[in-house]
Amino acid sequence: MDYNHREIESRWQQYWRDHDTYKVEAKPGKRKFYVLDMFPYPSGAGLHVGHPLGYIASDIYARFKRQQGFNVLHPMGYDAYGLPAEQYAIQTGQAPQKTTADNIARYREQLDKIGFSFDWSREVRTCDPEYYRWTQWAFMKMFGHYYDLDADKALPIDRLVERFEKEGSKGVNAAVSKEVEFTADEWRAMSRREKEDILMLYRLAYRAETMVNWCEALGTVLANDEVSEGVSVRGGYPVEQKVMRQWCLRVSAYAPRLLADLDALEWSDSLKETQRNWIGRSEGAEMRFPVAGRDFSLEIFTTRADTVFGVTFMVLAPESEYVAMLTAPDRKEAVEAYLEEVKHKTERERQIEKKVSGVFTGSYAVNPLTGKEIPIWVSDYVLAGYGTGAIMAVPAHDSRDYAFARHFDLPIIPLIEGADVSGESFDAKEGRMINSCGPGLDLNGLEVKEAIAKTKKFIKEKGLGRVKTNYRLRDAIFSRQRYWGEPFPVYYDSEGVACLLPENALPLELPKVDSYLPTSKGEPPLGRAENWKTPEGFPLELCTMPGFAGSSAYYLRYMDPHNPEALVGPEADEYWRDVDLYVGGAEHATGHLIYSRFWNKFLYDLGLVVEKEPFRKLVNQGMIQGRSNFVYRIKDTNTFVSHGLKGDYDVTPIRVDINMVDADVLDTDAFRKWRPEFVDAEFILEDGRYVCGYAVEKMSKSMFNVVNPDDIVERYGADTLRLYEMFLGPVEQSKPWDTNGIDGVNRFLRKLWNLFDRAMEADNTAGMTPEEKKVVHKLIKKVTGDIANFSFNTSVAAFMIAVNDLTSMKSTNREAMDIITRLIAPFAPHIAEEFWHRLGHEGSVVDSEWPEYDESALVEATVKYPVSFNGKTRYTVEAPAGASKEEVEKIALEAEGAAKWLADKTPRKVIVVPGRIVNVVL
RNA sequence: GCAGGAAUGGUGGAAUGGUAGACACGAAGGACUUAAAAUCCUUUGGCCCUUACCGGCUGUGUGGGUUCGAGUCCCACUUCCUGUACCA
């Protein structure tokens, strides 16, 4: 009987469906294991061979754990809200509800063909009202809480109101957008509107003015990467900087915990490091510089308190509130001109150009340590969003300040012994201080680190400022002027105050609209929805939530997907707790993986989840890149020249569909038929063939390099696809897709099939021979270890070796086949299921027991000899079965010289092979 | 600039500090076949020696170091990838 993958795979997939094989329930008392994949965005292009890479790896792991006796939760769903569906809707008028549902159906069909062990009864879709009611619910909870820094957790906003009523803002230590001070009496005297405005500064989900890229023509906010040189990438419409009222999440309040809890996670160092950088903790001091002739001070943040004696000017961010306050009347025109210039640049442009620009305000600050007056400037190299939006400039020891000082010819005072600042600044935090002595503080001769500590202490004692830790992590902007997302459960009352809908109004369903464009008044598309108001007639929020909203807590919903009372019920949460293994791309390092951790910590503070971190172990699978092919058109002709000859012509490379190319040789007839403009194409061939060039790029439809897993499954089978994707190399590594090796993997499965067939025919009921036992147990040991280490390519290789060995020893042993069936079940579940039933077992191989290996089976085939050594020590030499006693002894004795360093140690075992010592075991 | 990672045959890639190149692809040769496909066998890092598959030398980006022994550990450098970037 031949290996017929089509028949086997469709039969067992049907069996799994019929028997609900992958359905899982919480079983208190049984060890749980939660394996999760980052759920996909169902794009119109369908899955390509890169998508399943991580899913296959996690599926193998999930099946392995299940065979080891764990109760494994392995769900799947769809991150269904997103921009592409909306763009498509705008272009075609098709409802995103419909296109998304179609795409999901297609994804499901493709996923099913690969034989994953997902429990589909737990599927979630972020665009499903029964799911997103919990996204809206979480938002409401965040709106209703603030972050108390003394309790170091989120507390109900009512508690804050109580304190305000009793004591005003005094003693309240909370994460806040802007410090405000008021007494209890003042609070009580405030209007409702005023109180709400104050509370908005504290809420974890809050509305605030934020700087955005606004494109008038498109009627929407654009991300920085959607803007280039002041115009929108799409359409080329002008874009300006604009302050807009946006919903935000106070993620920054959790920065210290997000940083601290990173340590205990089993994530890759690089990913943890990326998150640490993103959170960006820096310790420093906040200092006040009095403004000359005025009764207020400029607050700045610095990590280099030691360099105060070298401050020769101050710089404000253009958006800083200080600018208006400090601009002298005679400088007003110049400053305003500069602000206008900056306004038309995007933040990104400001960063890329790096052209030094700025303007003097006409005001001076007083250096609190020297009493000297220093000019205050405005420049866009200072960011409004970090620290206080103002800096003290130390040109000798900061490269940005240095460039600015050189450009505007401001003084530069070196503060570190031996630092040459004639050509560039000396930024390193090392060396001995000089020129740093003033009234009350002398830093001269101190090391930089000592000087920083001493200065911090000084400014604290003298009341010049305070020690402060800053974080780079900013609050997340949570509004989008788009249609295809979760509506906010928010309305605006007659005073314009943002209010929550009652919880029983959830889910607030996304209404139908007739067009997905902004309204003529420039409102988001929801402005077109009929009756988009509360029963009382108050208008509902028109923005929707961003993509990361729905993906922030989906892992919790899988635990208890049909619970109508809660996102996750306490029993389900107590049992499943957290994700033991999370597999997905590293591109989410600073997005989803921060937001999810934040979301989880918030729910943890509320006592709704038991674990403070959602993802215990994380594996980032590499990307599978595409291999694009190119043809070379000679400029202004319809003649194409083969890759090797293109150097002789002036050519334009054009991507061609890889389906028309076989081993880089173009099918010229197919190419002529591909596009009307190529019908008359002429070719200049080499050796009678047209050879294409190639490049490794992202796999994408627009690059014509997409390989569809369905085609591979159809031709070779799902088991081959699964094994091959694992065999390509380490899961974590990115690699281009190439089909060259796939025959080898398919050949292996056919060999395994034949080996099994012969074993069944032989009807051999004897036990394994020592040789068979050795092969099989070596395999158990290797595969068990490799799966645990996520090293699937080497396990596939181990299977190949074992099958080759058993084939060449003409093994027909059923016990050996039984063990191999269980071992290969996670990798190639269809063929394993087939074997399992042919071996006469009941039930699915999914529930078979993972084999234990027998160390003695491995040692048995190895000879051990006692050998005397140095006339004192006795130890054993372990050698392959083939080596003779004399040979081994001789080698061991010859190695005596090399082993002399062992003189005062007692070796237990020296492992040798003919020719040299391999290992000395102490 | 900063951070993290990587560099091994024609290719993808293996190697708890212990026979480098597992396994696979590709290539070459052979068997079977009218032929092809499929399958099977042999060879396959480089160089050298030999009638004799015996043997030798060399070899994991470069230069040093630690070690009886280094692809692996340490230092410096080169190149590439990935992330991030005026964060004071």
Image: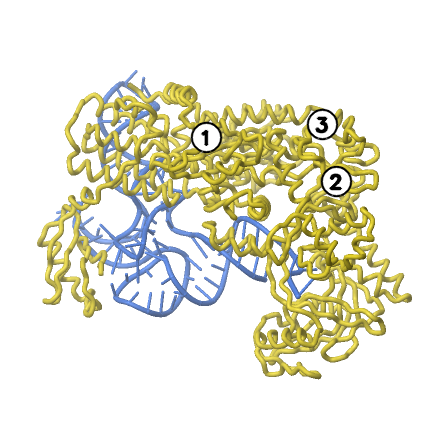
Tell me where residue A42 appears, x and y as whole percent.
58, 31
Tell me where residue A569 appears, x and y as whole percent.
53, 36
Can the viewer see residue A664 in this picture? no
In the image, the chain rendered in yellow is A
* Residue type at tag 3: Pro
Q: Chain of mark 2?
A: A
Q: Quadrant of residue A588?
A: top right
Q: Relative to residue A229, is residue A551 depicted above or below?
A: above
Residues at marks 2 and 1, common chain? yes
Q: CA distance from mark 2 to mark 1?
A: 40 Å
* Residue type at tag 2: Cys
Q: Which residue is tagged 1?
A: A118
Label of residue A651 in the image:
none
Q: Earlier in the sequence, mark 1 or mark 3?
A: 1
Viewer-side residue, A123 vs A427: A123
Q: Which residue is tagged 3?
A: A511
Chain B takes which shade in the image?
blue
Q: CA distance from mark 2 to mark 3?
A: 20 Å
Helix, strand or loop for disc 2:
strand
Helix, strand or loop for disc 1:
loop
Q: Which residue is tagged 2?
A: A499
Frontmost of labels 2 and 3 is 2
Q: For the N terminus of chain A, give its image quadrant.
A: top left
Viewer-side residue, A544 vs A658: A544
Q: Relative to residue A534, is residue B4 depicted above or below?
A: below
